[in-house]
Image (cartoon, rainbow, N blue to C red):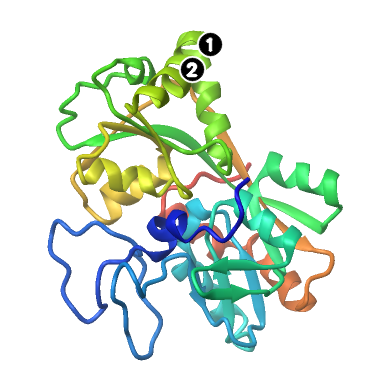
Amino acid sequence: MRNLRLHPLLLFAALAVAGSAKAAAPATDFLPPWNPPPAGLQFSVPPFDAVADLHGDIVDPQLVVFFAGNQFMVVHDLMAAFQQAHPQIRRIFVETLPPGILAKQIEGGVLVMGNLRITLKPDVYTAGKGAVADQQKRHDWFAERYDYARNPLAILVARGNPKHIGGLADLGRADVRVSMPNPAWEGIARQIEASYRKAGGEALDRTIMQTKVHDGSTFLTHVHHRQSPLRVLQGQSDAAPVWSTEAYFQQQILHHPVETVAIPAAQNVTATYTAARMKNAPHEQAAKDFLAFMHSPAAQAVYRKYGFLPAH
């Protein structure tokens, strides 16, 4: 893992933004963040003064949640529903960076983003079930855990599927530019590689992840797999294996000009997401309240809205 002073790497996921919130974005402007900003003076001058993966109140928060980054789209609605159920908790801070980076932040106690230094400790950490179990085995961080959603993979392509992508095997073609989550910090990469091996054995995995990386036709995301849909939208990549919810969000919620190529069940992988309350949570009761809320119909309705499957 590289040092967390990664402002060039974080430029895309955390410092990319679609202009001032008061200005109307042109139809071809697909840059994040896509969630509505909080109330207050709106000021952003991309790419220098803009933030996409830090949400809410960084000063004296009453609850701090480190969310796996692929759930950025649910945060606004989810936290609004939580605050409706718990109106006494008004100041919430959420990060939606990749879970590997969030884990490094917990280990080191600090995240440096450009000139900003963040030392807040999380009350709740969410990631894939396997990643949470691994962190518990290595660090014994968590007091309790709860599985709350599932998500299969899909292939995102431009509207009309100009490269005629029919499945994962086509991502090995020399003429297909692939955007691939970086295995260095993205758990989804391991899931996708497992699907490559199901679709075409070790040969397909090596072609996409070694040969094509070497010749430049596979792009490894710098930090966030949210780069992949944007690369497809901007014509920089032809296909991107993503969580199905990312494809759903781009196509059904934002109505961007993309479409989905389904991956057959025999080749697909489904992730289960787990929320875990930290043993040393600075806001213990708020953390307990949030984990209990994740069981609720209100929280589950938000996840269904954005295409996530029930955990069980």
Seen in the picture, residue 54 relative to 240 is either above or below; the reply is below
What residue appears at the point 60 percent right and 48 percent down from the top-left corner?
Answer: 2
What residue appears at the point 21 percent right and 37 percent down from the top-left corner?
Answer: 158
Q: Is residue 118 left or right of residue 13?
A: right
Foreground residue among 288 and 120: 120
Would you call the spot at circle 1 few (<14 residues within 10 Å), some (14-19), or many (20 or more)? few
Does the rendering let one see residue 250?
Answer: yes
Secondary structure of the residue carrying numbered label 1:
helix
Foreground residue among 146 and 20: 20
Disc number placed over residue 281 in the picture, else none: none
Which residue position holds label 2? 205
Disc number placed over residue 202 in the picture, else none: 1
Seen in the picture, residue 243 relative to 254 is either above or below; the reply is above
Residue 227 locus on image (x, y percent): 37, 48
Residues at marks 2 and 1, CA–CA distance in whole angstroms = 5 Å
**For the N terminus, which image quadrant?**
top right
What residue appears at the point 37 percent right and 72 percent down from the top-left corner?
Answer: 50
Contact? badges 2 and 1 (CB < 8 Å): yes
Does the rendering let one see residue 266?
Answer: no
| Count of numbered badges drawn on the protein | 2
Residue 88 locus on image (x, y percent): 64, 89
Identity, as a three-letter code, of the amino acid under mark 1? Glu
